[in-house]
């Protein structure tokens, strides 16, 4: 964990070392000005005032005023510079983390979980930012106040300084011990926060289902249980670190009592002076506050160490889905070819999710895929787009193994509508465009091809009309047509429609199939459907069952030779 924090400090703070050095110098000067004030006060009480020289009193009073103003100005300036460094550094960390999350393989995303990634991008980066800001502000000022205060008090009264310093080792030990103990606790806490974020995300996303099934009380109980778990872990970690401040106060106050007692005897015996004792008590208060700030800083550092470990765990993930050197295949006219492909989501699974899948498609052909839920339909297209790598076998596009193709090049070939795909809170046009360089005419054409022109133009919505998050203000069929328009907009080489017409009426579904066959005749299409009517006119139909290919051919062929396909047809008719 500490190693990860060192990497954060070295890799991300390195560009700001110069700015930090200037800030440290400014903070140092401002802190020295603070330390000068009690010394000047003691000098005035013990030396200037007894002489009765009013002009000297005014001069030294003016010096105190200058020191106070400089201390204020320099500390404010240094704090602003520290905040800017913390802000800019965290921005870079958050950018790199987000970029890495976007390029993580699906298998790695599944392992880390989406709620955990959200938590790392938000809570963990915030903890690191707090640490960077506080350590620059307090990490310079507080140690200077402690060390400088001790050095100045040595010039005032060495005996009292030794009394004060004698309690310092106890405060250092307490701070170190509890900080070391709290880091694993904060790491466990962040994992519980991940689970909490997942539950909240699920409940907010499915709030209509929860209300419709009258499961509000059940979800509230789940929420309360997990919330209590988070509170319990947070309390445990905070209580552990909360012992630092009272212990520090106790030891330093005990030292202060001894300082007052010894100081009183020394003044009474004539070994010290009242002004020195007053200055000494002021310095002791400064040192006390500095030690308290250091202990608070260790609380923030403990959280940041745990967060830095979680951040670097993602950033340090080795590059996945690398381009490999693979032999080309003699295509024999095949545009897409699966060659004995087997795949399991779990490495230790006895039954693969896809087993020994082989087929080929020519350019412009349409493959319909049908089968029961969990039969591997979506998995097949995920392998084709290389979201996962097959355990065995090979996949080819135009005779080239997809492992040999750069990921960006491969996925530019696709237009895809996933099962339960996402509508963003933006205009209809931007949901279709998705950041691509598409003209307004291309967007309008895509909407027309997707049979969405009717409700976009004729019902008064318009292309600039706003869509709520997840398409909450659209019907199921309208959402699917916007998603299909998005997939068609760039005229892809390969079109994947994963159960994307389930909410369409039969008339619209038929019109969409006609549009695809006419205007996208050169596009190779893979259509996953539950309705036979959506795929019965495809060039090839694949029937999957428990990850195995049990039927492949045309609609008529399968009616003759595939019992499962006939059963599906009969149940739907």
Image: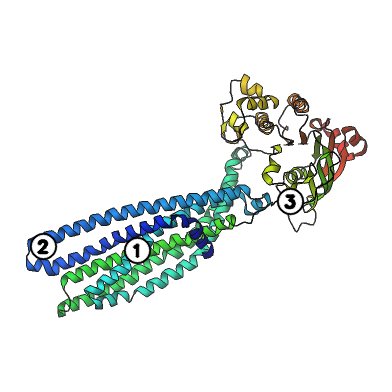
Pinpoint residue 98: horizontal percent, then vertical percent.
56, 48
Determine crowd level at label 2: few under 14, some 14-19, many 20+ residues with C-alpha closer than 10 A: some
Q: Distance between the residues labelled 1 and 2?
A: 32 Å
Residue at 16%, 68% (x, y): give it: 43
Mark before the other along the chain sequence, 1 or 2: 2
Numbered disc in front, either 1 or 2 = 2
Q: In which quarter of the image is residue 412?
A: top right
Q: Are marks 3 and 1 in contact (CB under 8 Å)?
A: no
Indicate the secondary structure of the residue bearing disc 2. helix
Question: To which residue does mark 1 refer?
Answer: 142
Q: What residue is rendered at 25% in x and 56% in y?
A: 70
Q: What element carries label 1?
A: helix
Q: Which residue corresponds to the image point at 21% horizontal and 75% vertical from the top-left? A: 263
Q: Disc 2 designates what residue?
A: 56
- Determine the residue located farthest toward the top in the rendered image: 458
**For the C terminus, which image quadrant?**
top right
| Residue, disc 3 | 389
Image side of residue 88 versus residue 527, left or right? left
Report how far apart the C-alphas of labels 3 and 1 lie in the structure. Answer: 53 Å
Is residue 217 shown to the viewer in this render? no
Task: Tell which circle, 2 or 3, labels the residue nearer the N-terminal end.
Answer: 2
Helix, strand or loop at disc 3? loop
Relative image position of residue 486 (x, y in whole percent): 66, 32
């Amino acid at each position: 964990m500490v190693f990860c924090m060192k990497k954060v400090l070295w890799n991300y703070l390195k560009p700001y070392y110069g700015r930090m050095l200037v800030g440290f110098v400014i903070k140092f000067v401002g802190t020295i000005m603070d330390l000068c004030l009690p010394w000047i006060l003691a000098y005035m009480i013990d030396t200037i005032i007894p002489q009765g020289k009013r002009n000297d009193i005014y001069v030294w009073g003016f010096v105190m005023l200058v020191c106070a103003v400089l201390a204020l100005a320099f500390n404010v300036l240094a704090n602003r510079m520290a905040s800017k460094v913390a802000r800019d550094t965290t921005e870079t960390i958050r950018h790199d983390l987000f970029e890495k999350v976007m390029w993580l393989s699906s298998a790695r995303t599944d392992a880390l979980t989406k709620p955990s990634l959200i938590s790392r991008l938000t809570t963990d980066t915030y903890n690191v930012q707090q640490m960077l800001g506080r350590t620059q502000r307090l990490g310079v000022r507080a140690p200077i106040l402690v060390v400088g205060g001790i050095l100045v008090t040595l010039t005032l009264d060495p005996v009292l300084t030794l009394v004060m310093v004698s309690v310092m080792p106890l405060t250092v030990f307490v701070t170190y011990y509890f900080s070391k103990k709290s880091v694993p606790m904060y790491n466990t806490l962040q994992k519980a926060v991940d689970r909490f974020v997942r539950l909240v995300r699920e409940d907010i996303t499915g709030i209509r289902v929860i209300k419709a099934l009258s499961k509000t009380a059940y979800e509230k109980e789940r929420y309360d249980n997990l919330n209590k778990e988070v509170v319990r872990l947070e309390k445990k970690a905070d209580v552990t670190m909360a012992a630092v401040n009272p212990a520090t106060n106790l030891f330093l106050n005990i030292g202060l009592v001894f300082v007052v007692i010894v100081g009183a005897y020394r003044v009474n015996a004539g070994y010290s002076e009242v002004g020195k004792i007053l200055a000494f008590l002021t310095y002791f208060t400064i040192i006390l506050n500095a030690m308290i700030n250091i202990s608070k800083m260790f609380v923030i550092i403990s959280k940041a160490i745990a967060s830095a470990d979680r951040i670097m765990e993602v950033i340090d993930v080795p590059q996945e889905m690398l381009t490999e050197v693979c032999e080309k295949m003699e295509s024999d006219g095949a545009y897409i070819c699966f060659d004995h492909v087997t795949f399991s989501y779990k490495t230790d699974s006895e039954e693969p999710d896809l087993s020994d899948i082989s087929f080929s498609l020519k350019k412009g052909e349409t493959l319909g895929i049908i089968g029961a839920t969990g039969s591997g339909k979506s998995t097949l297209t995920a392998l084709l787009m290389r979201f996962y790598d097959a355990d065995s076998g090979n996949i080819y596009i135009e005779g080239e193994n997809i492992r040999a193709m750069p990921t960006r090049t491969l996925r530019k070939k696709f237009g895809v509508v996933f099962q339960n795909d996402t509508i963003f809170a933006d205009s209809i046009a931007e949901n279709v465009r998705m950041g691509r360089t598409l003209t307004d005419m291309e967007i309008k054409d895509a909407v027309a091809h997707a049979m969405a022109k009717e409700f976009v133009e004729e019902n008064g919505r318009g292309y600039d009309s706003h869509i709520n998050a997840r398409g909450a203000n659209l019907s199921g069929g309208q959402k699917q047509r916007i998603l299909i328009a998005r997939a068609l907009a760039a005229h892809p080489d390969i079109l994947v429609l994963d159960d994307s017409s389930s909410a369409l009426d039969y008339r619209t579904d038929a019109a969409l199939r006609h549009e695809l066959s006419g205007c996208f005749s050169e596009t190779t299409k893979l259509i996953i459907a539950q309705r036979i009517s959506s795929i019965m006119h495809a060039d090839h139909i694949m029937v999957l069952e428990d990850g195995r290919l049990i039927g492949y051919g045309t609609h008529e062929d399968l009616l003759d030779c595939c019992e499962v396909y006939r059963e599906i047809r009969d149940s739907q008719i």
